[in-house]
Amino acid sequence: MAAIDLSAAPFNLDEAGMEWVHETRDALSPRDKLAQLFTLLSREAPGEALEALRSFKPGGITRIYSGELTAEIEMMGQIDAVGPVPMLVSADLEGSRMSLPFGTEVPNPLGLAAVDDVEATTAISTIMAEEAAAVGLNWSFTPVIDINKAWQSAIVGTRSYGSEVERIERHALAQIAAFQANGVAATVKHWPGVGFDDRDQHLVTTVNPLSLDQWEQNFGRLYRAAIEAGVMSVMSAHIAWPAFVRELAPGAEGEAFRPATLSTVLNQTLLRERLGFNGLIVSDATPMAGFGDWGPREETIPQCIIAGCDVILFSDDPVADLMYLVKAVADGRLSQERVDEAVTRVLGLKAALGLHKPDRRRPELNAARALLERRESRQSARAVSARVPTLVKDVAGLLPLSPDRHKRILVFSSGAVQPFAPHPLPLSLPNMLWREGFEITEYAPGMSVEVKDYDLMLYLFAEETLLTRQRIFLNWKELTGTVFGAMKRYWHDLPVLMVSLGYPYYLHDAPRVPTYVNAYGSNEDMQAAVAEALLGRTPFAGTSPVDPFCGSEQARY
């Protein structure tokens, strides 16, 4: 087995911790060793979820929490007993709509980047980590250190800290430090770097098109900084980097486009050897098409481990995937040495988090409830949210809004679009304005619009990053319900305001809209922050972390 220095960063284990890792690994059966390499998606009701875990005994789960705090805490109290080793419990702690259902509402990464205050990012990340730990989470698949360059990417979108490497670096390092100081292992993703290809790896193997020098100035800088800061894990994604593969094998053709999840060159040669990463490598979700593109699972699942991933993330059929690993060990494709190496890192992460200690603190209902209800956390998060709204342009001098001047408002809205919701969720911002004395009419497809009946037209969108969406854009026909409505523009007939509570690039589709605001997230506190700024009670303090004009001078006027 390749030597792993568990006393070095990011594990930093003492003698007792290292002894636990080695003794625990050697005591596991061959089957249970392989099961430690799986992190499974857990979204069933707690009782049903525990039964499934007892059957498989994975190394970890990604828990999609219900809103039932009592049941979730009870589940976390039993979870370590379902297998031979304490459980890693993970989530994507990305803020806004990707927050815990019973946690404090916080801005997403793009919102924090708009505030651009490392102390604010540290405060928000600390709240997130403390609340996560209180309900049993010990591992987050964040921060996202993708670079928001291909602005049409629906999958990078609001998950990124923007398009400037320096800004991404300072906020990502702040989140890593805050998470790991509070018992939650951080993960940087998506290796070897996303953001210059506007496609979604849920749907296709995407490509990092950068040269070696360009990569070093961008993703190389970010990953090296995270590793130097002691980040505990890296998520290897379904992303190819042809330039590096061809440096080693100039004649590489199709193999140059192999995703990192299945690439020894990207995981072992680059990440382990050249960048010196000693922590745990977790694959991105293996049901994605960017992974499935590369072959049948009986081949790709073993190759994921062979290529250097220590953990297989998600499985539609865990038993079948486990058997693929068993078969690969039996026929020699997957060595026992490589299995033991991966298990060592899984156990090393668990020991680094103190999961092996009998006296470690476990989730407790009253303590969790008290922490989740802290007034200071809500006040701190709302204060940061108030600094997020960004006034991109107001060429008409429309703002601030006033019932005296803009009393009758017609609202065109897509609602809050979410990946797993069958229909868009209603937004609260129109009601907030109604309570301020405005008369609100919400447009319905087919409705006749007479401009003389209104003093203001409000376009309101709320589409944060969306998996499998491929593109986010202003769909005029869907918004208005007709071909003719799609072609109608009102900003020469009455004042028009466009607000995005998510995707920041709608000026590409509406470059001539006179007043445009970005707020990056659509949670309730963010909508309230936008309302306060629109009414002139608080300033638009955000600075855009991306180019909202999409490289076009046309949209500035």
Image: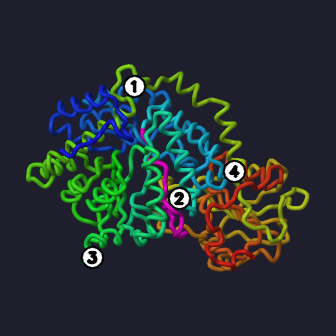
Is disc 1 in contact with disc 2, using a CB cutoff of under 8 Å?
no
**Which of marks 2 and 3 precedes in the sequence?**
3
User: What separation in Å lies between label 3 and label 4 (alpha carbons)?
Assistant: 52 Å
Q: Which residues are magenta?
A: 139-156
Q: Which mark is residue 527?
A: 4
| Residue 144 part of the magenta segment | yes
Left or right: 238 as drawn, with respect to 114: left
Quickly name the residue at label 3. Answer: 250
Marks 3/2: CA–CA distance:
36 Å
Secondary structure at badge 2 equals: loop
Is the residue under label 4 in contact with that under label 3 (CB below 8 Å)? no
> Distance from label 2 to label 4 (Cα)?
17 Å
Checking the image for residue 77, the label placed there is: 1
Location of residue 472 (image quadrant): bottom right
Question: In terms of secondary structure, where does tag 1 sit?
Answer: helix
Quarter holding the N terminus is: top left
Q: Nearer the viewer, mark 3 or mark 1?
A: 3
Q: Nearer the observer, disc 3 or disc 2?
A: 3
For the residue marked with disc 2, what is the amino acid? Thr
Q: Residue at x 42, y 49 (%)?
A: 227
Earlier along the polypeptide chain: callout 4 or callout 1?
1
Characterize the magenta stretch by its predominant secondary structure: loop
Residue at the spot of label 2: 465
Q: Quadrant of the C terminus?
A: bottom right
Q: Which mark is residue 138?
A: none
Q: Residues within 10 Å of mark 1 (few under 14, many from 20)?
A: some
